[in-house]
Image (tube, coloured by chain):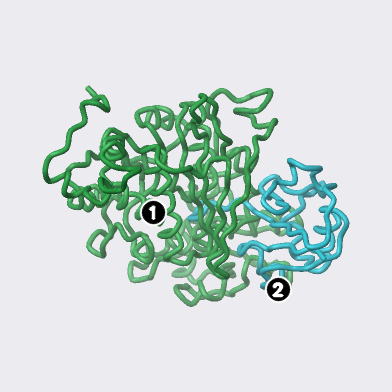
Amino acid sequence: MITIFIPTPLRRFAAEQAKVNVNAKNVAEAIRSLTSIHPSLTPYIYDEAELIRKHVRIYLGEDDIREKDGINTLLKEGDELSIIPAIAGGSF
Amino acid sequence: MRQTLEEIKFSKEELERYSRHLIIPEFNIEGQKRLKHARVLVVGTGGLGAPLLLYLTAAGVGTIGIVDFDIVDYSNLQRQVLFTTADVGRPKVEAARERLSALNPYVQFEVFNTRLDSTNALDIISQFDIVADGTDNFPTRYLVNDACVLAGKVNVFASIFRFEGQASVFNYLYADGSRGPNYRDLFPTPPPPGLVPSCAEGGVIGVLPGILGSLQANEVIKVVSGVGEPLAGRFFQFDAAEFKTRIFKISKDPENPLTGQNPTQTELIDYEFFCGIDLTHTTMHNAESNGQLSVTALNDWIKSGKDFQLIDVREPYEFEIANIGGTLIPKGEILKHLEKIDPHKDVAFLCRSGKRSQDVIDLLQMEYGLKNLFNIAGGILAWADEIDHGMAKY
């Protein structure tokens, strides 16, 4: 079981859940499982080319997956993923 | 002439004022001298800027620069604790200077009553040793980051949204002369417009900027005094809803356009454009030009009894705060209610500031080819400013 932590700005697209458990072998599978459980999250995580958006970082534990094998980073039982979107506060 | 660190002296009153710093063994009078010698620029006097400025002033930073273009508004007072009700309507930098000078007369303030932009950022930032970014939008975030990298300044960062807080120390100068990661290493590009609601649309819990701004002030004091381990190369996340804190590592991005392996950017750019924001939508005030309808023209439509449809695309809780009637269809639900839009009439779309309503119009025009759509420029805020002064602004 892999735990994915949902940041507060995205919880309304994930039935207000703070975390979602999935079964997955790598990061790509984990995020796909997440967006299949909560499809409303999809546009907030993937861009039109189905790549992880550049203002969204994915961490395995405290490490950016970019420093590992990106979305191909292998996961093991009990791993924790965090999704971190850029936030700016205030108004445009 | 700026005093050297060795020339810094304290009066009896100052020694008493700062005594709780002076008796911390690691901090002592050396740390206090570094604070007094320092020139710190605080960008933004909002929710983050308020605690930042209050604590940096109380702590005895020698010179504090304050940049903001805004005036104090009633909707600021829920979190911007630097201001009082009597300050509503005053320029924020003036109200801030008055309050802060009363708190600590030993601090010099240099205020810039202007919007930080690509034409003035390097000039202003270069005058200071360290920058604390308390701004509230993506274009200014990237502007402050890039200007700090280009000018070689440490950027103490915090950001908030609803119940989410983030903080880091960017472009930190290590003892070996190397620099820590910056904002573009973390988030290379901003979200596309419309994907992340702003606080003006999304709200923020009032005490959250107080928490993050205080953490920012602590990091500024640490960087200036050299005490402790700053939050450089690391990223702090605070979930105020669940009370969870996490710290992540930030690595350098080889593709960073400023500091990557092949830097392509050597000067400031157009940050509104970079963030995909077309200001022509919201600055257009000519009646009915380019699909933009001024609030004055809208008022004329209403008074003349013109047969048109008014659609308010805000959220129901916003509608409750202030409305001018019309059909309420929140932006996110517009496609589910296409049948409510009358194709035979002129349709005027209203939101808070004129941005969401323009997004809706762009969508309806591009995807559905709808015509005769008008964006109410400036939204209900403009209506409150220009037509109905009794209406609450939020």
Q: Residue furthest front?
A: B25
Q: Are marks 1 and 2 on the same chain?
A: no
> Left or right: B249 with respect to B131?
right
Residue lying farthest to the left in this orientation: B12
Amino acid type at image mark 1: Gly
In the picture, measured across the screen, residue B277 lies left or right of residue B380, that is right
- Label 2 marks which chain's residue? A
- The quadrant in which the N terminus of chain B is found is top left
Image quadrant occupied by the C terminus of chain B: bottom left
Q: Which residue is mark 1?
A: B46
In the image, is B65 to the left or to the right of B179?
left
CA gap, disc 1 to disc 2?
A: 31 Å
Q: Residue drawn 54% across and 39% down?
A: B142
Q: x, y (%) of residue A7?
A: 64, 61
Closer to us: B234 or B120: B234
Secondary structure at numbered mark 2: loop
Give residue B308's mark: none
Chain seen in green = B
Amino acid type at circle 2 is Ala
Spot the cyan chain and give its letter: A
Question: Are the two marked residues, 1 and 2, in contact with CB atoms closer than 8 angstroms?
Answer: no
Label 1 neighbour load within 10 Å: few <14, some 14-19, many 20+: many
x and y percentages locating residue A85 in the rendered image: 64, 53
User: Between A89 and B215, which is closer to the camera in this rendering?
Assistant: B215
What secondary structure is marked by label 1?
loop
